[in-house]
Amino acid sequence: MKNLVNQLLKTNPIIGLSIARWTLGLVLFPHGAQKLLGLFGGYGYSATIESLTTQMDLPSIVAFSVIMIEFFGSISLVLGFFARFWAIALVSMFTGIIITTQLEHGFFMNWFGNQAGEGYEYSLLVIGIALSIVINGSGKWSIDGLISKK
């Protein structure tokens, strides 16, 4: 178990990874805050759970996981705390989003409102950035880096 934790925390102290981690965390935070807290024009936890389970037919555990990953995962990414774990969670979540809702709408996002739904280009970017974190770790200036040094 200790070895697994060490592997999750190990990181390359590269500034570029920190930039990727901060960008991903900062972009995802408002989405998580909308879903959990109702900030930024969001509906909050109860309404989001209701929407994800009834309108999108997701199981309750998946709906709960989406909210937790977007909110707590984004904060943890900004801090560089168990960034690999949260990045793996994001890769899984956004792969699921592509497969279940976006693939049928093609590659491009719905910039002009003329598609039935969103394409997967945004999700693909999230997956790519998250995979770089999974492979290389949190980068410089991370809690993971501080813990792994001890």
Image (spheres, rainbow, N blue to C red):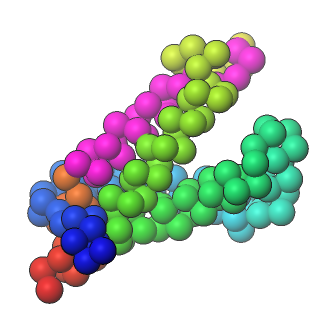
Q: Magenta span covers which residues?
A: 115-135
Q: Is residue 12 left or right of residue 51?
A: left
**Which picture quadrant has residue 79?**
bottom left
52 w.r.t. 70: above or below: above
In the picture as drawn, the residue positioned furthest to the front comes out as: 1
Q: Report the side of 56 relative to 63 (left or right).
A: right
Residue 129 is a magenta residue: yes
- Residue reaching furthest to the bottom: 150
Q: Is residue 3 magenta?
A: no
x 35%, y 68%: residue: 82
Q: State the predominant SS element of the stretch in magenta.
A: helix
Q: With respect to residue 44, does 135 lie above or below? A: above
Please tell me which residue is depicted at 30% across the width and 74% down the height of the picture: 1
Residue 90 image offset from top left, x and y in percent: 47, 49
Position of residue 96 measured from the top left corner of the image (x, y, whole percent): 57, 36
Residue drawn at 64 percent across, 15 percent down: 104
Q: Please provide percent x and percent y for residue 85.
A: 38, 60
Q: Quadrant of the C terminus?
A: bottom left
Q: Nearer the viewer, residue 119 or 96?
A: 96
Q: Is residue 42 left or right of residue 144?
A: right
Residue 15 position within the rendered picture, expressed as x and y whole percent measured from the top left: 16, 58
Q: Can residue 56 be seen in this snapshot? A: yes
Position of residue 109 relative to residue 137, above or below, is above
**Residue 111 seen in the current view:** no
